[in-house]
Each structure stands twice: as structure tokens, then as C-alpha cells.
Amino acid sequence: MNIPGRTFLVTGAASGLGAACARELTQRGANVVLADVNAEASREIAAQIGEHAALAQTDVTQPRDVQAAIDLALARFGGLSGAVNCAGILGAARIAGRDGPHDFDLFRRVIEVNLIGTFNVMRLAAAAIIAGAPQASGAGKTNTAGTENASASETDNERGVIINTSSVAAFEGQIGQAAYAASKGGVASLTLPAARELAQFGVRVMAIAPGVFATSMMEGMPPKVQESLESQSIFPPRLGQPEEFAALVRHIIENPMLNGCTLRLDGAVRLGPK
């Protein structure tokens, strides 16, 4: 899909991965709806981006909030071509720790935001995308070698793409990450059945499983935890940058053959038990 002129809903857009995606997409000529519960921080990002950004204070677990954000995209920019789900929370606790069993409400809240919230955005965004007209994927343009690709972009009938955020914790959840790992594992497992179902409408579904990234979520962890996680990145031996996540989001949008899978973006990190 060609990005210029398209409109994307970005959740968790007030900071970190979401903010980086919003900046990347608008720099490439897209319009974005910044959907986040933090209205003040969202206004700052919107001010940086300018006229190609619209702000929607959004709790992804609330259908009315998400639908209002989508309606804003339709009213302000005339359509919706995709959604990038970056909203999420942490919830560290042991299943049976010194303070007793895992707090049930905490587990439920993490699942509600990270998994149910992602599904809520996906289902409502998919309906809006399907209502739009198919568009050229860009596969028929001249490539870097100076030759034209064999496939014709006009025959793809692509309507849009939904990109969700999983985590390497989905595959290597550490002690204390039961809720977080379960929520992100659900996002990864949701990818293929969603892609299979929405394929008939020309909508792709992908997920990215980032490793250890420099975000506000990471900054909220104790220093020792941050150091431990960073030390497990093999190469580059550092935290990932939100802009690197956004670059992969851009590539997924532009590459129509990426569909139905979860891509790790992790510097070859493999998390230990703790």
C-alpha cells in the first residue's frame, strides 16, 4: 500500500512506539488519528505533527471511544486505511508470591487493555476499512533495481492493513510476567485467524513482537530490571529505539506480501527466566 494520502488510526500515540509511528507515517504523507487516554500528551504530539493529525482521547477497552476515533478519521480525512495498535500496559506480579496469590483484578486489567483492547480496535477499524474502496498496493512500481515488478498493484484489491503489537514476552515470558505474557501471546495468536478472515476483503493483519525498547513503559521499571533486560540484547547491545519500530510498521504497510504473521524486532534477545 502506498502511504501518501492514506489515513491511519494509531493507538497509544501519546508516547513511545505509538508516537514514533504517528511521526513516521505523517512524514511519509499520511494522515493519523492519535488515539490515547492521555489527552495532554497527545496534544503535544499533534502540535508537532500539524494539520495531518487529529486527536481522539481514547480508552481502547471502550467501544464508544474507539468508534468515535474512527468516526473522526472518516469525518476529518475521508476514510481509513489502517490501524496501528500500540496501546498497552504492564502488570508485574508473581502467581504465588510472598504477598499471596496474583492480584486477580490486575491480571484482568492487563488482559483487558492489551488483548481485548487490541481486538476492540481491530474489529471496529476492520469494518471501517472494508467499507472503503480497494487501493493500489504499490507492488507494480519501479523497484530499486530500476525494473518494474511483475505483479500488478491494481489487481491486489487491497483495502488496508492492521498492525498489532505483541512482545517477545509472548514467547519467553519471564517470572512475574504471567499477565503481560498471556496478553501478548493472545495478540500473536490472533494474527493468523484474523488475517485469514479479513483476506477476502483485501485487509492484511500483522503483529510485531518488539524486544526491549526505550519507551516510557521501560523507564517505569526498576533500574536493575532495565539493566538486566538491556544486557540480554545480543546485537545491537542496546535498547531498541521507537523509530526502529516505526520503520518496520512503514515497511509492513508498503509490502503487500507481509500478512498473517508476527515479526520479532528484538536484536536477537532471548529473555531468561528472570
Image: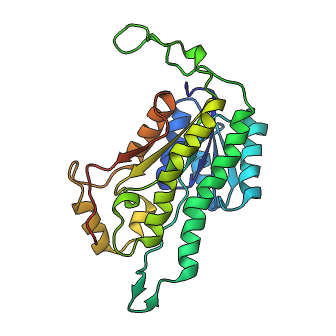
Kindly tell me whether residue 265 is visible in this rendering.
Answer: yes
Query: Measured from the top left, where is residue 87 in percent x and y?
Result: 55, 57
Kindly tell me whether residue 31 is visible in this rendering.
Answer: no
| Left or right: residue 40 compared with residue 67 | left
Residue at (33, 61) in percent of width and height: 172
Q: Residue 65: which quarter of the image?
A: bottom right
Question: In the image shown, does 60 or 179 lie closer to the viewer?
Answer: 179
Question: In the image shown, does 200 or 46 lie closer to the viewer?
Answer: 200
Residue at (39, 66) in percent of width and height: 219
The residue most toward the bottom is 99
Numbered circles on residues, count: 0
Q: Residue 230: which quarter of the image?
A: bottom left
Screen quadrant of the N terminus: top right
The residue most toward the top is 147
Residue at (38, 71) in percent of width and height: 221
* Colour setting: rainbow
Query: Measured from the top left, where is residue 58 in percent x and y?
Result: 68, 57
Question: In the image shown, does 267 or 55 lie closer to the viewer?
Answer: 267
Query: Measured from the top left, where is residue 210 in percent x and y?
Result: 39, 52
Query: Measured from the top left, where is residue 227 in percent x and y?
Result: 26, 67
* For residue 59, above or below residue 17: below
Screen quadrant of the C terminus: bottom left
Residue at (22, 62) in percent of width and height: 231
